Image (spheres, rainbow, N blue to C red):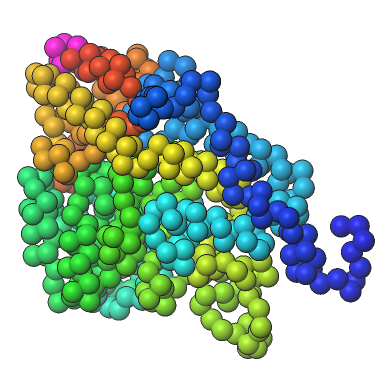
Amino acid sequence: MSGLTPKHDRRQWLVASSIGAVGAMIGGSTGTHAQSAKPLFSPAGDPDWKAVAAQYAVDEGLTYFNAGTCGLSLKTVVEAECRNRDAISRDFIKFFVEHYFGEPPVRLVERIASFVGAPADDVAIVSGSTEAMNIVASGLDLAEGDEVLTTTHEHQAGIYPWLLAAKRRRCTVRQVPLPSPAKSAAEILERISSAIGPKTRVLSICHVNYTDGVILPVKQLCALARQRGIVSVVDGAQAVGMIDLRIADIGCDVYATSLHKWLGSPYGTGLLAIRRDVQDRIWPSVVEGFDGWDTVDRYGNKPSGPGRDFVGKWPAAMQKYAWGVAYFGPLIWAALGAVEFHEKIGPARIEARTRELTTRLRRGLADIPGATLLTPEDPTLWAGMTSFKLQGIATRPLNTALNREHRMVIRTVTHGAIGFDANRVCTHIFNTEEQVDRLLGVLTDRARRGSTT
């Protein structure tokens, strides 16, 4: 800061210091263009899936089937995160100026918003679906007697924010039972639509159930909510990076997602999309100024600039809801590498690959005596997530045995009150046919022995 005199305004100095940094921020600073020696595509233009899988950082010998909890990150994304952390430690002011002032943060949001198919003004970058759902549940003004309608398959981070809000505001949360396996999208639509009552003010549903992997008919459900004047909230934690989607096409009022699951961004990255015409109804949860929610400052004056001097150009939702993004800059800037990689492979191709591996897994499970699939038969209702049970074999000990004895990571999902208890396998682009077959071999052996020990 040599040469800075008392006459210099802090904001003017910081903005001036950012000149020339804009072009370096998007893409170039992430180091994501580096690839392995083996090409990712064949001469015909098809992905070489083994070469794709080799791009991911994972311990040698570990077979990872749990993208639904936290996905693997690309090696280049991990490297970019490390470089960013080193840069912020070495020169905090330089990093802050280059990443949060002027055009770079605007272009960052525009890039990520474009990838998920939402207007940039609707998108706030947050730490994950948990934070996103809490912002919405705590920020929406609900009155005593109002009802939030949801389902029995919500993740705890998808329902407890509503339960907290209901306890504070004396409203109710009602959970619609959904069967596992579901027979059809029409069955799901009928169960939820018939549960909507005169006091229903919010419909909060998953895009993809984390329990049984069901893809809900969210577009039809959100259209139904809109017709009845109900706020539609979609928990898309399991969707982005697994299925090809555009948030704008869903027609929801709110979409919450994590970027560190199927997209493979650094752990602690997520996104909250709120329609511009709904943002006035949802208060921010954490503030450091009046940006996006008031027009006067702490002294009652109407200032000419933003409450925080560096958010002046930020898109609307970022100004209002993304208070904490400045604290995880190394993560979110590294996330661009995951976006670039998915764009390069193609979301449609990625969804097709997850379905291909899932189909292989499902066929193998069908041949195992005593195996029961809790994910539907209808292929339009699933993509990369499969839940199952083996007769006479407890789910959690099976999970533990696979990890300890075979270095295979899957997930156990248990909702005892509704009788849901299953092992869950996520197949993604960092998995291979050989890994799926190896898992099936171990499960077949366990089923024959009838024991998890």
Can residue 56 be seen here?
yes
- Please provide percent x and percent y for residue 314: 57, 66
Q: Is residue 112 above or below residue 388?
A: below
- 424 drawn magenta: no
| Quadrant of image for the N terminus | bottom right
Instruction: State the residue in front, 292 or 445.
Output: 292
Q: Is residue 134 visible?
A: no
Residue 392 on image: x %, y %: 13, 22
Looking at the image, is 237 positioned above or below residue 232?
above
* Left or right of 231 on screen, residue 97: right
Residue 45: quadrant of the picture: top left
The quadrant the C terminus occupies is top left
| Residue depicted at 38% across the width and 57% down the height | 117
Seen at 10% across and 37% down, the residue is 377
Q: Is residue 113 above or below residue 144?
A: above
* Residue situated in front as seen by the camera: 296 or 299: 296
Q: Residue at x 29, y 20 (%)?
A: 433
The magenta region covers 445-450
* Relative to 197, 333 lies left or right: right
Viewed as shown, does residue 421 lie left or right of 409?
A: left
Q: Position of residue 39 (x, y in %)?
A: 47, 24
Q: Position of residue 266 (x, y in %)?
A: 51, 41
**Main SS class of the magenta portion in the image:** helix
